[in-house]
Image: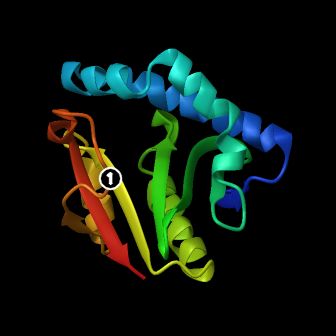
Amino acid sequence: MAGLTVRQVSESADLDAVRALCWEYRDYLLNFSDEVREAVSFTYQKETYAALMDVLADKHARPQGIILLAELDGVPVGCGMYHRIGEGDAEIKRVYVRDAARGTGAGLTLSRALIDKARADGYQRILLDTSRQFVHAQKLYEKLGFQARGPYSELPPGYEKFLVFYEITL
C-alpha cells in the first residue's frame, strides 16, 4: 500500500485530476447548505468556474504558485493550491478532500505542504478564506497556526457574511 502522498502537479494527467477534484469541490459546495449554495452560485457560476479551470495551471504556476495533489494508495483524493496576491503574500485556494479520504489526514497533510512550499518560496504570509459553516476547516487552519482576520480583498456587497478569513505569518 502506498498510503497518503502529496506531490506537486507535474503532468497533464495530474492537472486533469485536480480539475476533476475542483469540479467535485464546487458540487460539494453547491450541495452543502442553502447559504453555501447561494454564495457559490454568486461567485462560481458554471461559466466563470469553467474559465477558471482553463487557466488554473497559469494562475498557480511556479515559482509564484503551486498546485498539489493528494493521493491515497495512488488514487487522487484531494488538492490544494496557492498563488501570489501581493508582495510577500500568498493565498491558499481550493483545498478539497474527497469524502472517502476524510479522516485520513489528507487535509492536514495538504495544508502543511502548502505552508511549507510557500515558506520555501519566500512568502512571509499566507491568507485564505473559508465558509463560516465549514467549522472543521476552521479548526484545521487554527490548529496550523492561522489567525482570524478581516477580509483581505474587495468583496461584493453582502458577501462577507458567508466567509471567515485567516492569515498566518511564516
- Residue at image location 30% in from the left, 75% down from the top: 145
* Residue designated by label 1: 153
Tally of marks: 1
Q: Is residue 144 visible?
A: no
Name the residue located 46 percent from the left edge and 35 percent from the top edge.
Answer: 99
Rendering coords of residue 81 (x, y %)? 57, 54
Q: Depth check: 123 or 27 in front?
A: 123
Q: How is the image coloured?
A: rainbow
- 104 left or right of 5? left
Name above or below for residue 8 compared with residue 13: below
Depth order, front residue of 101/151: 151
Query: Where's residue 15, x and y in %?
Result: 74, 41
Viewer-side residue, 38 vs 28: 38
**Rendered image quadrant of residue 21:** top right
**Placement of the N terminus among the 4 image quadrants:** bottom right
Residue 103 seen in the current view: yes
The amino acid type found where label 1 is placed reads Ser
- Mark 1 lies on a secondary structure that is loop
- Quadrant housing the C terminus: bottom left
The vertical placement of 24 against 113, above or below, is: above
The quarter of the picture where residue 5 lies is bottom right
